[in-house]
Each structure stands twice: as C-alpha cells, then as structure tokens.
Image (tube, rainbow, N blue to C red):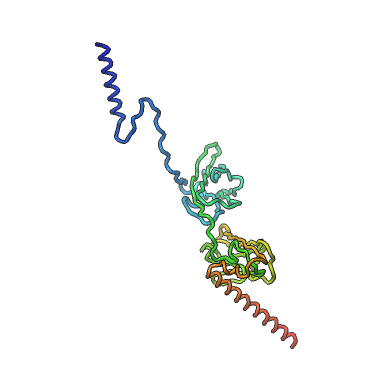
Amino acid sequence: MVAAIFACLLITAFCVDLGAAAKPGQPIKPKGAPPQPAQSAAASDFVKDGVITFPQPSSSLQTARPVIGADFRAMQNRAQGSKFLLLLDGADVTASSQITPDYIFYSPSSDLAAGRHHALLKMFTPDGQGIVVADWNFHVAGAKPLMYAYPRPGDTISAQRPVIGLRFDELPRDLDRRSIRLELDGKDITAACDFTDQYIFYSPQGNIGDGAHTVTVKAQRTGGGAQERIAWNFSISKSAPPSSALAAAPEESRGTQASAQAMTGARRQANSIARATTEAEWIL
C-alpha cells in the first residue's frame, strides 16, 4: 500500500514538471539541463561621447586607403599620460600610427580589401585601466571601374604617342583641381599637360616606347586632408591593331581623344607660328 502511494506521488510530480516545461513553441528540456547560450546580437558601433572617429562609423568609402583613427580632444584630461592601442581587423597597427596629444591616425600602406572592416581604439590610463574609446565598423566599396581614362585601362595599343588623360568625373567632387598632378611611369608630367573644364590630358612629344606603362593622377581634397590617387595601366605593342586605342574606348572617350588630339595639333600649330614669328623678327 505504501509503495503504491509513493509511486503515485512520483508520477504526479513528473507530470507537473512536464506541464511547466511544455510551453507553446518551446522544446521540453530534461530537468537539470544547462541553459542554452543566448544568440549574440550583431556588432554595433560604440564611440565615447565627444570622440570623433574617422572614417565615420558605418560609413561606406570609395577609397581603399582611408585614414583610420580618432580625435579625442574632448577627453584630453583623461588622455594625458595614457597609452593607446589601435586595432584594424584585429591587427595591432599602433606602432605604424601617428599619435599626438589630440589625435591618433593610421594610413594603410596598401589597399584594404573591399568589404567590411573593424577598428578598435583602446586607452590605457597610467594606473593600468583599459578603456574602450571607440569600437566601430566601416565599409570599403572597392575601386570603381574607370570609364573615362585613356588609353583605356588594360588596353594594348600600337600608337607610340597616345593621348593620356582622365576626365574629372572620375575624381571625388571635393578635390582641389589646382592640386591635380599627372604622372607617367612615376615621372610628374603635369607641367606638360593641358587642362579643360572636364579633362586633364598629356600629348607626348616623342615615342614613349613599347611595353607596360602606368598613369597616376593625384590630388588633394579641398581644405587639406589625405591625398586621393587613381592609377591605371596600358601597354604599347607594334603588333596591336592600329585602331585598338579608340575602338575599345567608350563613345564619349573616343570623342574626347579626338578633341584632345585636335587641341594638341592646334597647340603645336600655335607654337610653330610663334617660332616663325620670332625668327622673322630676328631676321628683320
């Protein structure tokens, strides 16, 4: 009799426990099972009040070499005597950073891959306390294709004196056009270039030779800041079809090349007239 009553009590307790656990939409867990870990939330940006990060949190960038860091002047009293740690995608870049009483910034020596990047800035006070100053993400969109560069990026052409240039639409809008420089194979040739409202272009006075060539356009942003850089390559080969330089270019670029060549011809004609005039004056 006693055994029967004890068995009934056990069954009743077990059923009550199942009823408590069996809530709608939830699995029944064995009694004493360890709690399941909570799903981690997506990483969010954190920046201490008054601190300014660059790039801005959650920003999307065209440049693949952004300046990364922070302006912590607002917390200057707490920053005095402290040391900083700057991580980029988990890598310690503090030793390669510039650190002043007001700023820390890092300039990558190579292009960052397209996609999301994570930056973390931590401050260590003189007493050894570690404080996260900023923990943020930014996105590099990657280099966009150059539509109005000539010769076209990657082209192989036969012309030994191709018109070389770039349309300003390929550059950020806040660039100082007075700072634009054009280099060919590492040599600054800006002084020999022509500028229009929309283009900078260079017309070689002599053959630049077979093989691969690199064109680089550099400019400063208005009001200072990091230098923007656009570069592309083309090749010259005597075996390339004579029309390849123009045939592969977009219609507007082809028209621009023709205009550039016409302008170059006009400039040469003007120079010839000037020389002829000078010689005539000398004879007289």
Residue 254 found in image quarter: bottom right
Residue 206 occupies quadrant: bottom right
How far across and how far down the image is residue 28, in percent? Answer: 33, 30
Q: What is the residue that sits farthest to the right in this orientation?
A: 283
How far from the left and from the top, in percent, is residue 89? 54, 45
The residue at the point 46 percent across, 51 percent down is 58
The residue nearer to you, when weighing 173 against 21, is 21
The spot of residue 216 in percent (x, y) is 61, 62
* Vertical relation: 16 (above or below) 216: above
- From the viewer's perspective, tell me whether residue 243 is left or right of residue 32: right
The x, y position of residue 284, in whole percent, is: 74, 88
Residue situated furthest bottom in the rendering: 284
Q: Which of 181 and 141 is in front in this view?
A: 141
* Residue drawn at point x = 39 percent, y = 27 percent: 33
**Quarter location, residue 260:** bottom right
| Image quadrant where one finds the N terminus | top left
Q: Count the marks.
A: 0
| Residue 172 visible in this rendered orientation of the protein | yes
On the picture, is 24 further left or further right than 124?
left
Q: Is residue 81 visible?
A: no
